[in-house]
Every structure is written in structure tokens, then in C-alpha cells.
Amino acid sequence: MVTLKINGKSHKVDASPEMPLLWVLRDLLGMNGTKFGCGVALCGACTVHLDGIPRRACVMPVGAAVGHAITTIEAIGATPVGKKVQQAWLDLEVIQCGYCQSGQIMAAAALLAKIPAPTDTDIDQAMSGNICRCGTYPRIREAIKLAAQTPSTDKRGA
Amino acid sequence: MARVSRRQILTAGAATGGGLLLGWHLDAQARVLGAAAKATPSVFAPNAFIRIGTDGRITLIMSQVEMGQGTYTSMPMLLAEELEVGLDQVRLEHAPPDDKLYANPLFGDQETGASTSVRVFYEPLRRAGATARTMLVAAAAATWKVDPASCQAQKGVVTHSPTGRTLTYGALADKAAKLPVPAQVSLKDPKDFKLIGTSAKRLDTPAKVNGTAQYGIDVRLPGMKIATVAASPVVGGKVASLDDSKAKAIKGVRQIVRLDDVVAVVADHMWAAKQGLAALDIRWDDGPNATVRIADVVQGLAAATQSPGVVARKEGDAAAALANAPTKMEAVYQVPFLAHAAMEPINCTVHVRPDRCEVWTGSQVLSRAQATAAKVTGLPLDKVVVHNHYLGGGFGRRLEHDYVTQAVRIAKHVDGPVKVVWTREEDIQHDVFRPYYYDRLAAGVDARGQPIAWMHRLAGPAILARYLPAAFRDGIDPDGLDGAVHLVYDIPAIQVEFVRHEEPVLNTGFWRGVGVTHNTFVIESFIDELAAAAKQDPVAYRRALLGKSPRARAVLDVAAQAAGWGGPLPAGHGRGVSLLYSGWGSYLAQVAEVAVSKSGEVRVHRIVCAVDCGTVVNPDTVKAQIEGGIIFGISGALYGEVTLKNGRVQQSNFNDVRVLRINETPAIEVYLMPNGEAPGGIGEPGTAVTAPAVANAVFAATGKRIRTLPLERHLRSA
């Protein structure tokens, strides 16, 4: 049994510590927003936050996540920066098939939380680990810039 | 406007009642999987696409599947435009498989592919909307005992203009349902369109920003097991022996299913299944393809092009013109096998019971998925229910139903529902690949460098002979030849030949852009060679040959001007141009600007693309498809390649299936040139037009003509 803190709630799961967090989320907890893309940290579809830092859930042993705050796509909209990113994604119609977009949004939210006004180089560095086969990259770039310019409605900031 | 007669499907659509439709409601609240059958108390369903309840609920049924291309917005726009409702008033529902109600008229079955949805449903769906609206107005007019012509429909409400009386569609549903379906209805004049032609917001994206959108891989059912598979690494191979003792010892592994050509590990979760798979000791009998290398494939195709093929287009006497031409140019072009690598790995969930089979997946071909499940289980078609989902990318891969067949075969041995999920490695190595094509080109040019003869002989498999045999006639595969037979240049003698050559060492099928992606690379590279040999500007050279194709000339002009064609460039940079016309009916011109490093690394800096796809339903969606198509095309052109050794695919994951990333993505500018012509296809042309523009830009930058893709590898060895 491991106890995880996911999106502010405590979950007890029957998993061995080496089981990747991705399968704990998807197959044990039924939190399907986090996606399986490659299984070896090459595509970023499974990106979640661990204490606000973007991590690839497909290669993260669940044991390593114990004691840390895990945030997934299901709850990123509850953070001011996550909400801005989601809105920018909709305003610019970033999404096509959408399968990689949970990971893209999680990566973008982590970037903006760390660097509120990122340069193109910052965006390249933060987002180049996330593959999109539909080719939404130009709009992802613009949406990150739009979100960066959007004032937070919440004074607590990111 | 479209003048193609599509009366047959209109009649079928309009004459059929709504019945009890299966499917899911896509709003976030209704997430109960499988609890699909929902009878509204009383409904008005004048055709298979529209259902209006007495509660005022308006449901649009989507026969075309959503895989990112925006069809869940463009199809509702067509219906809502004529129905006179707002997109904010409708709910969408996936259609069940039903070829009688939902066949794509181009193929005769329910398919989403080949960039056809808007093209073939533009008029039928408008007519479906107009039929419903006409009946609702008639019901209102009858209620008020007034002339229907004095009533107007807007936003789901019918108003009697002289008196200002109103009735909602919900209030009229009962009465409208009792009226006969009119045989003829009038469609709106395009100048009165409120939705068509606007960048309406997509209906599928709100659920895709918060993780609630349901893809096939997200299916969860009570008691469901999760399986992952190892299929024979060589096409035609079989399991020779299996030791599964170690796999069975892994916690969470429940069952090993051994079939002829595949072994499945069935487990409580994917982690256990993956560990189990790794612990299996499988010995394969590789069969007849055990020693195949990529060179064998190339050799077979090269040999095939030594003999004439079936003539698919003939104008003038190309052989004679070629023989008499002052100068003759020849070239061989090759394009490799390609994997699709959609982001959602292949998966399919199946529950087989003695009297019933249910399938949950994402498929571009629902009725084929249903038919294969019926065949494998031996159940009648009406005992097989297929629940479709959002597709995490299609690109042609999900036009195949091999994975449904495999999942049903496995599920027959499993008690309860089982979700079969392929690892990424399995997804890459058991793809249905874009075929390897081998092309011989020859042109005769006159003293001024103008082409007077064009010979194009291409060799490859006939995918349609397998996939849609009725479309394979007289030895001609219209898919493989698409684009090649549409050559728009004004050349007096043209001959295009197809040599069918099957290489059954890999399964091959449709890849975004299909025949056009291959042929446009070949044609537009070779015409560039002719321009270079004539020492003429590539744009001017093409332009002079487009006297009979004003739409092609117009897109070329717009792209060249927007790209600043002819303007100065930094050292090491080059610009290349390409032009596309094909059976999709759209015209595109593209200018690519690239930089090539000393080590041969190609960086695409900028792409300018001009698009004339006739009538545009949703301009923003068209732009998005072109942008995405271009990026897909760059990945393929620069890096895309699947190779074979000992019959085995050598690539396995995104480490060696390299695809473009955000930091490698160029600036992309798309110029739409909408007009009143019939809608053309748009999902694939952006991909098809890209490789030649990039290759021609590489030539401009380096002087090296790369005739075999992928560009980077062949540039380094050039």
C-alpha cells in the first residue's frame, strides 16, 4: 500500500513502489486524463506535476511520488496559471485530436509558473519534450504567449 | 456550388426514421460507458442525423469520426446552418455503425478518411437540416393556420412574422414528427449563411483541455482486464513455442492467451501486463519473410519498373515525343515505408459473451470494425455493438481494423471485458505502413527548355485492390495514382503508368496524403529539375505551364508573393516551391525556406502555403489542418523511414521514429483563397505539398538534388 497526495486529496493504492505513476493514475485510480504515449519518457503525453515540477509519469516509480504533491490535468484548471493556459488553448483553438494536450498543458502550466513571461527559447526548452503528431506547435507557442499576457483573475498568482 | 448529384444518399437519409440510436452523449455529465441506449420521450427524427426532443433537446448524430480534423464542428455547422439553430444549442452523439444510414458516398461504407467529409457531406447534411427545418416550420404554420411562407425559423424558434407569435422546436417536435418528410426542400443561398464560412469554435475542445475527453484507451468497465500483446515480429510468422511460467508468476498477471501469431498477457493493469510481456519466452517461426531486408524490397520494385505498366493517363504520344526531343532527362525517385505513430497507441476493448459482443474503440471505419467482430465471434451483425470514441490521431492508421480483429480473437478467450493496449513499440512495428514506392521519370525538353513529353512510371502495391476492390479497375489503383494523373502542367504529351508490385513483407495501407503525398514529391521535384536544367526560375517555369489552370496559377502567385520569392536570403539558406492538385479538388502552392548546416542538418525556417479549397466551411479549421499537415509532412520528409532487417521492423519508439518537435517547427503562414467552387479536401494536402517544397529548397541551398526520402539521411550520403 502506498499513500499518494493527488490534486489535494489523499489516495491509498495497492501498488508496488516501482509501478509507474502513470498506471497507478490510469488503471488503479481511473484518472484517465493523463495519457500513455510511449512508456519511456520520449513524448511527454503523461506529464504531471510533482510539487509543481513537470515529470513524466510513465517512468516515475510511484514510490518516488510518495510525500509529494501530485497534480494532474484533472485539477490544473483549479490553479490560476492552469486556468489561464486552458483558456488560451481554447481561445486560439490549439487542439486537434487532443491526445497529447493534457501533457502539453501540464508542461506549459509548469513553464508559466516558473517563468511568467517566457521567451521563444524558454518555450522551446520547456516544451520540446512534448510531441504532438497533429502539429499544433505553432498554436501552442502562441497560446503560451497569450496566457502569459493574461492577467490572473486570482491575486494569489501562480 | 457543388453540382455533383448526391441524390441517392439524400433520399436514404431523409426517408429513414430516427429509431433508437445507440451512442454516447458527449457532454461531461453523461460519462456512463455503454449505457448508451437513450430513448427521449418523444422525438422528431426526420433523418439519421437530427433528433429533436419534446424537451427541446437538439441532438446531432455524427457519422464522421473526430480525430482532430474538426469534423465534430464542421458537420454540425452544415446541419445547424440549415436547421437554423446555434451551435450552442446542440449536443453531439457518435453514430453507431450503419452503412445504410451513414455510408460515405465515395466509398459505399461508413468511412472517415481521404479528406472527404466536407466534400461529400456538404450538400447532404445541409439538406438534412433544411428538411427538418421545413417540417418544423410547416408544423408551426399548421398550428397557427397560416402560410408557412409567413413564418421564419431562427435559433430553434419559429416565428410568425406578421403577428409575432413564436413556438420552439421542442414544442413543435411532436407535430412535426407526424408530417410527411418532404421530397424537396430548398437550401439557403450562400449569401445568407450565418455559420458556414465562419471560424466557429470547436465543439470537442472544452473536454480536451481538462482531461475529460474519452478516447478508446480511456474505456473503463466493471471487471475489465488489461492486456498487452506481442505479435509475430515478422509478417507471416507464427509462435513456435512459448514459456510463460515467469510471466504467470508476476503479481497482477491473470492469463496468457496464445494464438497462432500473437501472445497476449491479460492482467489487472497495464504495468503487470507489460512486465508479463517482458517475462515471456517466445520462440517465433518467422516463416517465409525471415531474411527480408529493405534492399530486397527496393530491388523488387526497381526490377518491376523495367517493364511497362498499365497506362492511367495518356495525352499525345509521349514515347515518340520523348524519342524526338532535343534533350531527354531521366530520374528515379523513391519514398520509404512510413509509420503513422499517432499519439494514442493502438487499442481496442472487447467483451465477448455467448450471444453478444461489444467493442469500444476509436475507428475511422465503424462498420468494418463491427463486421470483423461478427466474423471472428460467429455472431450475427446485429449482436455486435461498436461504441466509437474520439481518436487520438488517425492519419490513415485507424482506417484499418486489424487491431479490432486481434482484440476480438483475444477476448474470445477472456472471461469478461478486456482492453487490449499495444505498447508504443508494438504500435510502430505492427503498423500498416505507407508503402515503399519507386518511380521512373523521363521528360523531353525543347531547345528553350520547355517540356514537350512527360513519362511517369510508378511501382508500388495497389492498396485499393485489398481495401476497396470495387475501386480497383483495369489494373489501376486510383489511390496510388492520385496526383500523378492530375498533373496540371500544360505539356503536349503525357503518359502516366502504374506497375502493380506487391511486397508482402510488411502490411501497407493509407498514410496521411496517400498517393498524393508520394506523387507530389516526385512530380514537383522533377519539374524543379527541368527548371534548373533550363536555368529558369522555378516559379516562373511552373507559371508558364499553367495557362490552362488559372486556380493553380493563382495559388502559386499568392504563395510566391507572400514568401518574398526571389528576395535575398542568408548564406546556406534556400527557397523551394511546390504545387499540388489532385482528386481532393483543392489547389495548394507552398514555398519552403530552409537552412542546411555543414553536417547536413536541415532546418526548415519558414513555410508559406496558399490554399484554394473552394467553399470553406470553417476557415480556422482549414488553417489548422494545413499547419498540422505541413508539420506532419516535414517529419516525414526529413526523417521518416521504416526499414527491415531479417524481416523485422528496425524502428521501435520516438527515439528512432523521429518526428518534429516544437523547437524544430518553422514559422508557418497559411493564405486561404475561398471562393464559390465545390469544397475540396483539406485534411491531407498540407502534408502532401510539403516534402517537395523542402527538397527543392535543399537543392536551392546546396545544389544537391535528393531523389530518395528521407532527406536528411540521403543528403548526408549525397
Image (cartoon, helix red, strand yellow):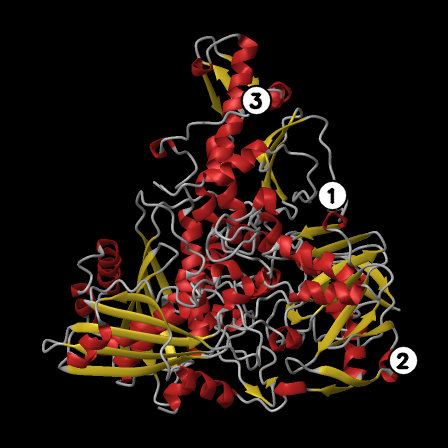
Q: Nearer the viewer, residue B393 or B145?
A: B145
- Residue at 65% across / 44% down in the picture? B26
Residue mark closest to the camera, 2 vs 3: 3
Label annotation for residue B249: 2
Asked if residue B7 lies left or right of residue A20, the reply is left
Question: Residue B640 at what x, y percent from top left?
Answer: 48, 77
Task: Find residue B257 and report its image quarter.
Answer: bottom right
Of pointers 3 and 1, the one earlier in the residue sequence: 1
Farthest residue to the left: give it: B447
**For the residue carrying disc 1, how many other residues have a C-alpha within 10 Å: few (<14), some (14-19), or many (20+)?**
some
Asked if residue B430 lies left or right of residue B660, the reply is right
Q: Do the residues labelled 1 and 2 touch (CB within 8 Å)?
A: no
Question: Residue B569 at what x, y percent from top left?
Answer: 23, 75
Report the amino acid beneath label 3. Pro
Picture layout, residue B58 above or below residue B235: above
Badge 1: chain ID:
B
Tag 3 residue: B180
Residue B166 at least partly seen: no
Tag 1 residue: B36
The N terminus of chain A sits in image quarter? bottom right
Report the amino acid beneath label 2. Ala
